[in-house]
Image (tube, grey):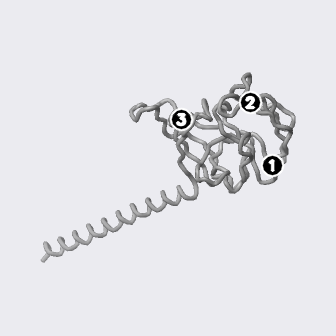
Amino acid sequence: MDAVGAHARGRTATRRWMRESLLAVGTAFVLVVLAQALVVDVSTVSSGSMSPTLLLGDSVLVNRLLYRLHPPRRGDIILFRFPQADGREFVKRVIALPGDTVEEQDGRFRVNGTPVRTLSPDRPAQGVSGALNLAPYRIPAGQFYVLGDNPEASLDSRLWGTVDERNVIGKAFLVIWSRGNHWWHVRWSRIGRRLP
C-alpha cells in the first residue's frame, strides 16, 4: 500500500513539475514577444550609409520605449519607417529637430548657423546623393532631419525630406551581432559596441 501511494505521489509531483515548467517556459516566451513588441527591436544594417559608425551586416538593438518618454535628440541614431511609405526601415542620425534651421552648401551642413561636425567634414557629399545645396530651411513641428554618417552613400533627408515623428520606431543603442560578406565572417570586435 505504501509503495502504491509513493508511486502515485511521485506521478503527481512529476505532473506538477511539468505543468510548472510549461507555465514558466510559456510565460518567458510571452514576455520575450511583448518585450520585442513594446520595448526592443532588432534591425540589421543593409547599406554603408552609416559607416563607420554602423557597418553593412551589423545588427543593432533598438529601444522602442524611449521616445514615448521624450522625443529624439540631436545626434541620436534612429530606426524609422521610410517616409515614402514603401515599408522599408532606415537607420540614420538626427541632425536637426523641429524648429531648427538647416542648410547645406557644397556638402557642408549648418544647423541654426553652426557647422555640423560629420565623420568626414573635409569632403563634400558626392556619389549617390551628390553635393547638394539647400537654402536655409526650418524644420516643421513633429519632423526630424536625418543624415547618414557616410553622406557619399546615403539616401537621407537631403533627397526625400524630413522624417515624421509618427514614423520613428526607436533609438539604436547597441551592436549585438556583426557579420561580414560571408556567414562565417563574424566581426567579433564590434559585438557589444554601444552607440552614442
Query: Relative to the observer, which residue lies in front, 64 or 54?
Result: 54
SS state under label 1: loop
The image position of residue 61, as x and y in percent, is 55, 45
Query: Relative to the observer, which residue lies in front, 133 or 59?
Result: 133
SS state under label 3: loop
Residue 98 got which mark? Answer: 1
**Mark before the other along the chain sequence, 1 or 3:** 3
Badge 1 amino acid? Pro
- Crowdedness near tag 1: few (<14), some (14–19) or many (≥20) residues, C-alpha within 10 Å: some
- Residue at image coords 70%, 38%: 147
Badge 2 amino acid? Ala
119 shown above or below 85:
above
**Mark before the other along the chain sequence, 1 or 2:** 1
Q: Quadrant of the N terminus?
A: bottom left
Q: Quadrant of the C terminus?
A: top right
- Crowdedness near tag 3: few (<14), some (14–19) or many (≥20) residues, C-alpha within 10 Å: some
Badge 3 amino acid? Leu
- Residue found at the far top of this picture: 122
Residue 56 got which mark? Answer: 3
User: Mark 2 or mark 3, which is nearer to you?
Assistant: 2
- Residue at image coords 71%, 29%: 125
